[in-house]
Image: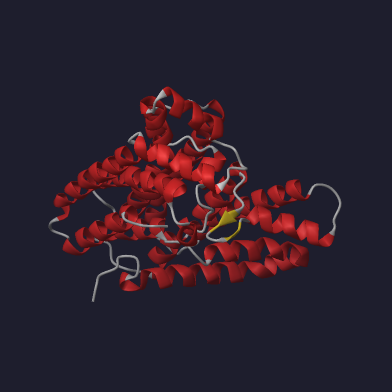
Amino acid sequence: MEFNPLDANGLRASIQSNLDSFVSDRKPLMQSASPDTLPLIESLEGLLAGGKRLRPAFAYWGFKAAGGEDSDAVMRACASLEFLQACALIHDDVMDASDTRRGKPAVHKQFETTHLTNNWNGSAKLFGEGAAILVGDLALSWADEMLLTSGLSNDQLLRAKGVYDVMRTELMCGQYLDLLEQVRGDIDIARAETVIRFKSAKYTIERPLHLGAALAGASTELIEVLSQYGLALGAAFQLRDDLLGVFGDSSITGKPAGDDLREGKQTMLIAFATSNATEAEKTFLLENLGNPSLTSQLISQLQDLLTSCGAQDFVENQIASHLETSLASLDALSENPEAKVALTELAILATKRSA
């Protein structure tokens, strides 16, 4: 049977079970405040029911790489990262004005629809965005609560909390840099790399690995190995995401085709294209990038432009190079074959994906 590190040792099922029980336990508190608050939980439950579970998986395999033994407390601690991810996704969709997430209405669009359906007063758009921000804040609060009440020892909590605090700060820095680039425009490769490093590489892979490894009391040497692996793989992961945002199949990604072009995302693709396309191509790209009313024909033309100027190939080559660097670092885990195989498979899953 093929080894899947996302499901090995009951990982993904345990993550979902922990999330479900945590949310269920907090419903009475929300109910006691007012039954009107329950839609906040319902929208969050919908988001928590899907996803790749990469961050908990990297935390878990970082823990195993450091020689950790499975426990319910560790599984709950790893699962808490899904609340942090939910917060990031919800707020990201508000900032990007994205209508969909995983093929369903984004949280802010769900509440906007509720406003319109009930014919309430004021702006449906502002109500939807405000409610979504609160759901994201709730998820962020619960991420902290779930980690701190996971049942870890005090020593484990102290080690994990230090990593967790840094990870959250880096995430907010990365999110702001991404937001800044959208309005500043004219992104270059160096700035694109900075956004990738802090919005994705550290948050998605390096810090979850560090958090798991810290729970097992990892050595400084292992932490360095995990950084080499995680930063390179995290860059490849985000670059794959950038390609899918432009060239992905909407029936698989759950996002409209070419959505990043409509949103005007300043990515490595755009940085390369604006530096290497002809003047006419660059003018056409910049005139259309960020137009929310882009037709399918214009999206197809922009896709062709990004292919013909070499941007797509450049990013694919960057992914391959980062993946090679990441996998090479795992030679240091030769004495822990289970973790080495799992991290190898996770690297492939993170970079060869279609959604």
Q: Residue at x 56, y 41 (%)?
A: 263
Q: Residue at x 15, y 50 (%)?
A: 332
Position in image of residue 77 (x %, y %): 43, 60
Position of the N terminus by quadrant: bottom left
The residue nearer to you, when weighing 67 against 340, is: 340
The way the protein has been coloured in the rendering is secondary structure
Position in image of residue 5 (x %, y %): 30, 65
Q: Residue at x 50, y 51 (%)?
A: 257
Compared across the picture, whether 89 is left or right of 115 comes to left
Compared across the picture, whether 133 is left or right of 19 comes to right
Position of the C terminus by quadrant: bottom left
The residue nearer to you, when weighing 212 against 219, is: 212
Q: Is residue 18 visible?
A: yes
Q: Is residue 220 visible?
A: no
Position in image of residue 270 (x %, y %): 43, 34
Residue 42 versus residue 318 in the image, above or below: below
Q: Residue at x 31, y 55 (%)?
A: 352
Position in image of residue 92 (x %, y %): 56, 46
How many numbered marks have been drawn onto this rendered protein structure? Answer: 0
